[in-house]
Image: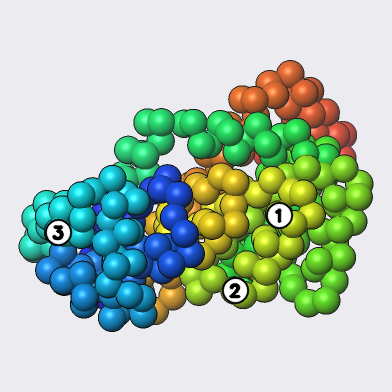
Amino acid sequence: MGVNDEVVRTVADLFLGARLTPTQRRIAHCLVEHAAKAAYLSAAEVAELAGVSQPSVTRFAMALGYEGYPALRRELRSLTGPQAAAPAEGNPMQLAVRAEAAHLERLHHDLARLDDVQRAAGLLVRSRPLPVLGLRAAAPLAGYFGYFAAKVHPDVRVLDSGGTQLLDRLDQARAAGAGAMLAVVLPRYPRESLDAVREARASGYAVVAITDSAVSPVAEAADVVLPAAVGTQLVFDLHTGPMAMAMVLLQAMCDAAPEPVQRRLEEFEATASRRHIFEA
């Protein structure tokens, strides 16, 4: 995109929590994708880039609480100008790691308010069973979360493969009593993941989504969105932020039900000791 990840995240944060129509979400996604120049585009240019009408851009700005698009553009300039001009020092590997550090710093700032994390934890900890969806690039993170969640939750079902049986497994979990699911959806946003989330919502699931941005395609279909940026400066994305968010969410689940969690942890430690599972 020709712009550092911090600027992208700053623009995306502007839309965090906003209830947007699909057309407005398309405009938001366009502004994030063109974060380097978004603050200097006219309403007509944004409309052309997003493939929408110019009045739609005006309505989008007003939906965010601005008098019109010029006011939104001034806000974008104030947010992105100094950051975009900041000099970058170091080799490409250093810059990639520095960007990840900036992502974690922003996540640290965002977690000053835990409302969404605590709401998500409350939904997930009560779900029996608990499906955890993660396809393609998100599959390892879904498995990582599921491995640790299974130590404190009695029935975690990791859904990390697609195909014709994916929706069957969601139906089976729902029939067994599941009321909520965690969906990890990361770029490039597999269509199968998005379809599964929509199907889950239609089946009555509450959906918690860990994704890279408040304007991710999964956001409009989720009940709670927990954004954490991914690194894009290497050939393949870095998922440090989403992994940190997943572990924060798991901690919040433990905090939401401390007594049963402690009991299950003690039972696991007793079993691990009896079976000599670990060397230390």
- Asked where in the image residue 47 lies, by quadrant, the reply is bottom left
Number of marks in the rendered image? 3
The type of residue carrying mark 2 is Pro
The type of residue carrying mark 1 is Arg
First in sequence: mark 1 vs mark 2: 2
In the visual, does 76 lie left or right of 187? Answer: left
First in sequence: mark 3 vs mark 2: 3
**Quadrant of the drawing holding the N terminus:** bottom left
Query: Looking at the image, is 46 positioned above or below residue 250?
Result: below
Mark 3 residue element: helix
**Numbered disc in front, either 1 or 3:** 3
**Numbered disc in front, either 3 or 2:** 3
Distance between the alpha carbons at the discs numbered 3 and 2: 35 Å
User: Can residue 96 be seen at all in this image of the molecule?
Assistant: no
Report the residue marked by disc 3.
Answer: 70
Tell me how the rendering is colored: rainbow
Q: Nearer the viewer, residue 4 or 216?
A: 216
- Asked where in the image residue 76 lies, by quadrant, the reply is bottom left
**Quadrant of the drawing holding the C terminus:** top right
Report the residue marked by disc 2.
Answer: 190
Q: Nearer the viewer, residue 255 or 267?
A: 255
Report the residue marked by disc 1.
Answer: 201
Neighbor class of circle 2 (other Cα within 10 Å; few <14, some 14-19, many 20+) is some
